[in-house]
Image: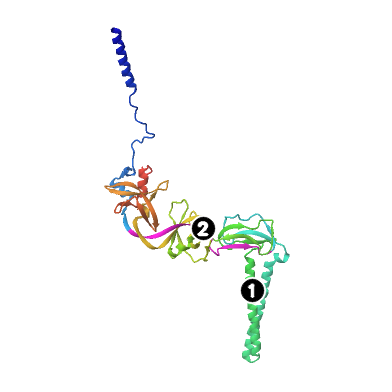
């Protein structure tokens, strides 16, 4: 009897243990867990003292719907203006000597020596002396012709000379004057290339510019009028923009454009429309527009690719904020600081649709009527991230 009761007790315990091992499994583990999540609506709020607001000179402007000029941003290429690139040629046949040849990309001033050439013929070595002698001879002949004309005119008044003789003397004097003018021009042309002690000619820069390419090197013998180097005038450059022919009529080609370097977050350069040769690309169905842009620091380079914001005909409405209110972070995102009142400011992400002069059209991120900071926005950005502490 005892044995049967003990066996029943063991069986009950075994069943209880077996039912405990079949307990439901725990909840499935998630692959990632975010603690203390924060949305952009919970970004830091900056509260300044009245003295800090006054010291920073913070100014705000209300976001409003307004009419803004339509623009279109296209790629452009910086080029040398037509007629502002000159190929310097050899004045005479000779051999280039010396080692003071400028390298491509070097800036030169008007009159700077570029190359030295030793003429092949002795007559060519003495061309400046010959030009000076020819000028002196022409001036002497002009003086003699003028004095003869004066004597004949006096004799004509006294009745001792004929009118025909005076007319012939006047014609000879005019020929002598023309010879003097030609001799002076020749001497001036020779003087542009100074002659050295050994008769060598120094080729100098015709104007201020940048050496674009070199076509001859020292030790090379060149013919007269052979190309030596090319100089480009780059104080003002052109920007060439290829526009789809169907959109060319919609672009306002009398208004200024804005030029921005690739990857440059600085202020864009102002470009003025210019009259240029009419060119296009039939395969791309495009036409070329040209704009002149003055050099700045850092200077533009011929061949550089840029972004050009072209003005369109007609205006459109949108949310407009001043350009000074827009801030760019290191990732290129655009932000503004909204004035919450009581000297409190919050950073808001905005999406810029386009630039319109000194204003920006915002597509989303801020509502109409909100006040955004213009003057003092960079200082608030630095204060939030530690630079202004």
As drawn, the label of residue 78 is 2
Which secondary structure lies at badge 2?
A: strand
For label 2, the crowd category at 10 Å Cα-Cα, with few meaning under 14, some 14 to 19 and many 20 or more, is many
Q: Position of residue 328 (x, y in %)?
A: 40, 49
Foreground residue, 241 or 136? 241
Residue 288 position (above or below residue 5): below
> Is residue 281 rendered to the left or right of residue 153?
left
Give the residues in magenta.
Answer: 66-92
Residue position marked by numbered label 1 in the rendering: 182
Residue beneath the point at 67% across and 76% down = 140
**Sequence-wise first label, 2 or 1:** 2
> Is residue 83 rendered to the left or right of residue 198?
left
Camera sees residue 197: no
Q: Is residue 236 magenta?
A: no
> Is residue 176 rendered to the left or right of residue 24?
right
Q: Is residue 67 magenta?
A: yes
Q: Marks 1 and 2: in contact by CB < 8 Å?
A: no
Q: Position of residue 314 (x, y in %)?
A: 38, 63
As drawn, the label of residue 334 is none
Q: Position of residue 250 (x, y in %)?
A: 43, 64
Dominant secondary structure of the magenta stretch?
strand
**Quarter containing the N terminus:** top left
Q: Position of residue 22 (x, y in %)?
A: 34, 23
């Amino acid at each position: 009897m005892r044995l049967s009761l003990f066996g029943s007790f063991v069986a009950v315990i075994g069943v209880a243990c077996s039912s405990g091992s079949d307990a439901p499994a725990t909840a499935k583990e998630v692959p990632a867990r975010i603690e203390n999540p924060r949305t952009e609506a919970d970004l830091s709020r900056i509260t300044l003292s009245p003295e800090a607001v006054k010291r920073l000179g913070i100014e705000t402007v209300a976001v409003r719907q307004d009419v803004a000029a339509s623009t279109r941003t296209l790629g452009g290429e910086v080029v040398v203006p037509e007629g502002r690139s000159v190929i310097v040629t050899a004045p005479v046949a000779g051999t280039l000597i010396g080692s003071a040849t400028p390298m491509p990309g070097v800036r030169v001033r008007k009159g700077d020596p570029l190359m030295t050439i030793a003429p092949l013929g002795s007559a060519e070595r003495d061309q400046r002396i010959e030009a000076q002698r020819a000028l002196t001879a022409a001036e002497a002949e002009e003086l003699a012709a003028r004095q003869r004309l004066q004597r004949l005119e006096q004799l004509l008044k006294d009745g001792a000379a004929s009118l025909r003789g005076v007319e012939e003397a006047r014609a000879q004097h005019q020929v002598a004057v023309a010879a003097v003018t030609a001799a002076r021009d020749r001497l001036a042309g020779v003087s542009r290339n100074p002659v050295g002690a050994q008769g060598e000619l120094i080729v100098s820069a015709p104007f201020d510019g940048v050496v674009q390419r070199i076509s001859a090197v020292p030790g090379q013998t060149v013919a007269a009028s052979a190309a030596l180097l090319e100089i480009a005038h780059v104080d003002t450059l052109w920007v060439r923009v290829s526009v789809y022919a169907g959109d060319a009529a919609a672009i306002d080609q009398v208004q200024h454009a804005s030029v921005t370097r690739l990857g440059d977050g600085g202020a864009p350069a102002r470009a003025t429309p210019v009259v240029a040769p009419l060119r296009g690309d039939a395969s791309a169905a495009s036409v070329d527009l040209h704009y002149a842009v003055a050099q700045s620091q850092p200077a533009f380079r011929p061949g550089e690719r840029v972004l050009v914001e072209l003005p369109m005909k007609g205006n459109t409405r949108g949310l407009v904020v001043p350009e000074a209110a827009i801030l760019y972070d290191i990732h290129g995102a655009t932000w503004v600081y909204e004035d919450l009142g009581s000297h409190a400011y919050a950073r808001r992400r905005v999406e810029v649709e386009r630039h319109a002069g000194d204003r920006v059209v915002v597509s989303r991120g801020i509502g109409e009527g909100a006040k955004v900071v213009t003057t003092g926005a960079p200082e608030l950005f630095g204060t939030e991230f530690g630079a202004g502490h």
